[in-house]
Amino acid sequence: MKKYNFSAGPAKLHPSVISKAQESIIEYENTGISILEISHRSSEYKEIMDKLKKNLSDLLNIPENYFILLLQGGATYQNSFLPYNYALENSIGCLVTGVWSKKTYEDFKLVKETQMINVENTKIEEFLLKDNSKDFENIDYLHVTSNETINGLQIRDFKNIKHPSLIVDMSSDIGSYKFDWDNLTYIYAGAQKNMGIPGVTICIGDENHLPDADNPSYLNLRKLAENDSVLNTPSTFSVYILHLVCEWMLKSGGIDFFETQSKKHSKLLYEQLETYSDKIFLPISKFARSRSNLVFNFVDSSQEDEFLSEAKKHNIIGIAGHRSVGGIRISLYNAVDSDMVNYISDFIARFFNKK
């Protein structure tokens, strides 16, 4: 039975990726062994890594002076890892736009005094459209969460943040739009939303800002970079799935295709939801609404359970809002195609029009 998966993560994978992975689990490329058994020191794995880094560079237009690492631990690990590398000898700040960036701030400040710049929801438009450089005085590195999956707030134009050295958590929207690298020092993204499965975190940084820190091995960014992601045994299967997703994305048309798709899908659903403003409300202003995670709440909260129950009957899964806030959350990641979006749009129309 087909399910329509709009989960915020782990998220939907394209069928071609799953099919290729199935083949490789039985036997990888005539090696006589499964991809699950392959050594991270083997020539086969090195070939996967080389292709993957080349494809990531092509997809994201990564400058030549940036390193690419594939680490473990997700964004939560990065919350501990980053201040131990970038902040021990420098000052650091966090732009707080929602739950996840607040969590980063709370972790950062346990390692190093961290300045918080709070611009949640209604403040975000005014903040980004002004000259905000004075807000960051005496901050060497500024952390930003590009997409808040819980409240559905997104920042895509990093040039609107007038700071020269940004560290950006792009876990839930990497690969869905083009961006400039001009003021990006380091970005990271857990792959399990837009580009793969749990177990691998994409980390990309400017070599000119590679810190010298006397940290234990897996907390030492320079040592990890020097060992090209194999300081320890990596999550080889997660890396392989990321490799397959990158190949699929390039064959589909690259970032241009997925950015166009993201705009199209989110526009269709947001415009539809706005017609039911007497029954629901969208918590984020139009300026900062996420194209990756569409969040809304019912005016009559008792309708939420009915909506989720009816959705389940129609094989729609993964749309309950985060457990901390409730509501509805429809995630439109790269593998969510137009047929899926049209299907949930039809469901929404039938649900509200019968009321």
Image (spheres, rainbow, N blue to C red):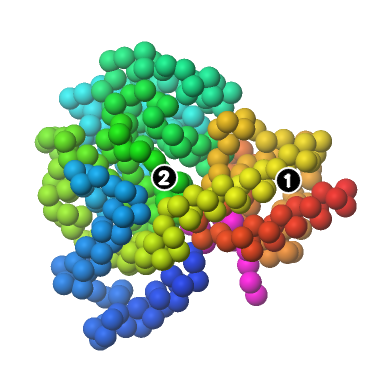
- The quadrant in which the N terminus is found is bottom right
Residue under pointer 2 = 178
The spot of residue 263 in percent (x, y) is: 56, 47
Residue under pointer 1 = 272
Task: State which mark lies toward you, 1 or 2.
Answer: 2
Q: Earlier in the sequence, mark 1 or mark 2?
A: 2
Kind of residue at badge 1: Gln
Q: Which residues are magenta?
A: 1-12
Image-based side of 336 in relation to 352, left or right: left
Q: Residues within 10 Å of mark 1 (few under 14, many from 20)?
A: some
The spot of residue 299 in percent (x, y) is: 77, 36
Q: Is residue 92 covered in magenta? A: no
Q: Is residue 250 above or below residue 268?
A: below
The spot of residue 16 in percent (x, y) is: 46, 72
Instruction: Work out how far the residue at label 1 is from the one at label 2, CA to CA, in angstroms.
Output: 26 Å
Residue, x 40% and y 76% (percent of image)?
20
* Magenta part, dominant SS: loop
Residue, x 58% and y 36% (percent of image)?
289
Residue, x 48% and y 64% (percent of image)?
13
Q: Residues within 10 Å of mark 2 (few under 14, many from 20)?
A: some
* Residue 241 visible in the snapshot: no
Image-based side of 70 in relation to 351, left or right: left
